[in-house]
Image (cartoon, grey):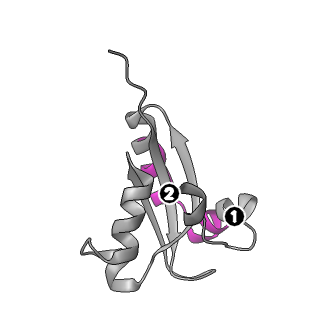
Amino acid sequence: MNREHRYFVYLLASEPYGTLYVGVTGDLAVRMGEHREGLRDGFTKEYGVHLLVWFEEFADIHEAILREKRIKKWNRAWKIELVEKTNPKWDDLFPLIV
């Protein structure tokens, strides 16, 4: 049985130009629900980081994890530039994935 898998690297923000968070998941809609409802303890809950401002899809989990690790090492200006390339108004993209 050949199942197609989808993995996502995503960037959350507390507000436009606010606190940023980079994550990876196999189910973006479920993970976003967890972040938005405060169901996961940690950074995003503590700092109110719940706006989905950027995401990228992968078929291979190893590629997704590698991309996440690379982005986490980037400086803040590069992360902001990444968001603004596709989402210059810092809109919440959550409605696009549900």
Q: Nearer the viewer, residue 36 or 59?
A: 36
Tell me: residue 46, above or below residue 10: below
Residue 76, image quadrant: bottom right
Q: Amino acid at mark 2?
A: Tyr
Look at 45% across and 51% down and name the residue there. 68
Is residue 73 in the magenta section? yes
Look at 41% across and 32% down and name the residue there. 5
Q: Position of residue 46 (x, y in %)?
A: 32, 84
Q: Amino acid at mark 1?
A: Glu
Q: Position of residue 70 (x, y in %)?
A: 48, 50
Look at 45% across and 37% down and name the residue there. 6
Residue identifier under label 2: 10
Disc with the residue nearer the chain's start (2 vs 1): 2
Foreground disc of the pair 2, 1: 2
The segment highlighted magenta reads: 66-80
Do residues under tags 2 and 1 come within 8 Å of each other at their CB atoms? no
Q: Position of residue 9 (x, y in %)?
A: 48, 51
Left/right of residue 46 with respect to residue 59 in the rendered view: left
Q: Quadrant of the N terminus?
A: top left
Residue identifier under label 1: 81
Residue 17, image quadrant: bottom right
Name the magenta segment's main secondary structure: helix
User: Which residue of the protein is positioned furthest toward the top in this rendering?
Assistant: 1
Q: Nearer the viewer, residue 63 or 40?
A: 40
